[in-house]
Amino acid sequence: MAAEIRSSYGAPTPEVPRGAGASRRATTTGQIKDFILAEGLRPGDLLPTETELCERLGVSRSSVREAVRTLSTLGIVDVRHGHGTYVGAMSLDALVEMLVFRGVLSPGDDLRALRDVVEIRQVLDHGMAERIVASLAGTSNPGLHALVDEMVAEAAEGRAFPRQDRAFHTGLLARLDNALVGQLVSAFWEVHTVVVPTLGLSVAADMDQTARAHGLMLDAAEAGDARAFHAAVTSHYDPIGKALGVTTP
Amino acid sequence: MAAEIRSSYGAPTPEVPRGAGASRRATTTGQIKDFILAEGLRPGDLLPTETELCERLGVSRSSVREAVRTLSTLGIVDVRHGHGTYVGAMSLDALVEMLVFRGVLSPGDDLRALRDVVEIRQVLDHGMAERIVASLAGTSNPGLHALVDEMVAEAAEGRAFPRQDRAFHTGLLARLDNALVGQLVSAFWEVHTVVVPTLGLSVAADMDQTARAHGLMLDAAEAGDARAFHAAVTSHYDPIGKALGVTTP
DNA sequence: CTCAATTTGTTCGTATGTATA
DNA sequence: TTATACATACGAACAAATTGA
């Protein structure tokens, strides 16, 4: 697939007589991508209608549809029924869907896929620690503190707090100038929280520690204390890490 | 999309009268995923033919086709022309294709997307450093050393060495018990190397340093020296980091 | 509010290319 | 080589959703 991508750029996609190995759909998706680039379209811009694309590319509507579907699942285009097709925001939803399925399919060990995801989350949080602390040092974030309070309250009642949890992690990365890492963290967070219930895993006992660790992370970041932030991240992943047997060097 | 995923598990996908918001394709993809889970199929296993799926799910051929396409681009199934449809290996090809397009589309600053990718690569390499060193300490890896020698030789001749570079990074992570991180590193490596040429970026001058840094990383890992490994990683990303303005805390 | 136009969603039938036995 | 099974592609028709007159 990599070679196909590469060949799609540089030289414009060749005309109708396509190479032996390439399928019609592959070439059509490439043509639509090239069209977006050639026209200089940006996320949110409207694409031609399916019928128009058929004429422009000289293929049937079915082929255009399949190509558009492919681009749609990749988030490259966004199709709205009865309205039109737009250039998409290219979120990581596809990655999430794939990893979630891999998690519930669980090849080999039942917990391996989830353990890998948690390990990545940990690496990203630790790896971005200095940048996060730098971006939040000296600021005050009442919204994030409110989320922490809610999480602690929910944990005390024995309830889960996925909404606040996600909002907190998203908010923590919001000031970073790296949009991709925020999306990745969100994506892995989602895989994590969607897969856990399907495995019947019970980590409810330590929900309190998890909730409190969020507060410690925020306090450390606002104080500009990277070491404390690292410690809080470690504390945050301690319960789930133990349950899954994550190695923490 | 997240809600749709969640609803797909737990309770089996409902019968033909589907909910208001869900499209036929969305429910059909869910049904196929449920089928794989229910039958306990594993990557490489054969799925029913399209015609058979039509009867089983009570939808038309086209709908099955579009659903299979969607799952195919996610890597959940693998369609082989004239042969059949199999459960896929679920690689990160979809993520790569999306990020590559985002990179060449370059919303806003031309280098931001690539800079974000390089930053992630850096974080992953540093974050996995201790685990990599632990997995390679005390071993000898003539294959990896050979790759380093090739890279140094190619750099001396002023040639690029993408094949060896990729093989090296893959091999470095091969002994890890976390398959996902290896795939992620490979994916971001691919995005990086595919996008760079489209931007006309010239970092050829410091190819020599990059090639040598690989050798330092390998030596440090085999010696069990995590600090040296971190230093080598920093040296490895120094040239491209300077060219892109990556922040290195 | 209803109607009509536009656009995507779904289905069917048919023909073609491809791999296996 | 032939036969069979399968995926690929095309075109036409109708259904559903959205917008605006």
Image (spheres, coloured by chain):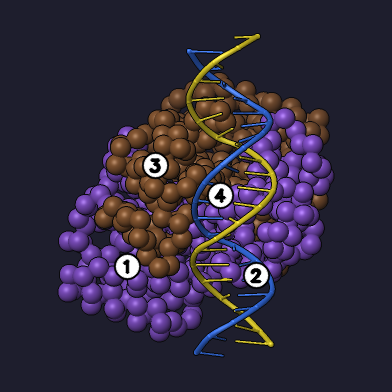
Chain colours: A purple, B brown, C blue, D yellow
The secondary structure type at the circle numbered 1 is helix
**Residue at x 47% of width, y 38% of height:** B50
- Mark 2 falls within which chain? A
Image coordinates of residue B71 in percent, x first then y, are 48, 46
Q: Name the residue under label 4.
A: B95
* B185 and A195: which is toward the camera: A195
Q: Is residue A234 found left or right of A22 in the rendered image? A: left
In the rendered structure, which amino acid carries the disc numbered 1?
Answer: Pro
* D6 and A248: which is toward the camera: D6
Looking at the image, is B103 positioned above or below residue B174?
A: below
- Mark 3 falls within which chain? B
Q: Mark 1 points at which residue?
A: A162
Image coordinates of residue A105 in percent, x first then y, are 34, 42
**Residue at x 70% of width, y 59% of height:** A51
In the rendered structure, which amino acid carries the disc numbered 2?
Answer: Gly
Q: Mark 3 points at which residue?
A: B55
Q: Work out whether residue A124 can be spotted.
A: no
Cα distance in 3D space between marks 3 and 2: 38 Å
Q: Mark 2 points at which residue?
A: A44
Question: Do marks 2 and 1 share a chain?
Answer: yes
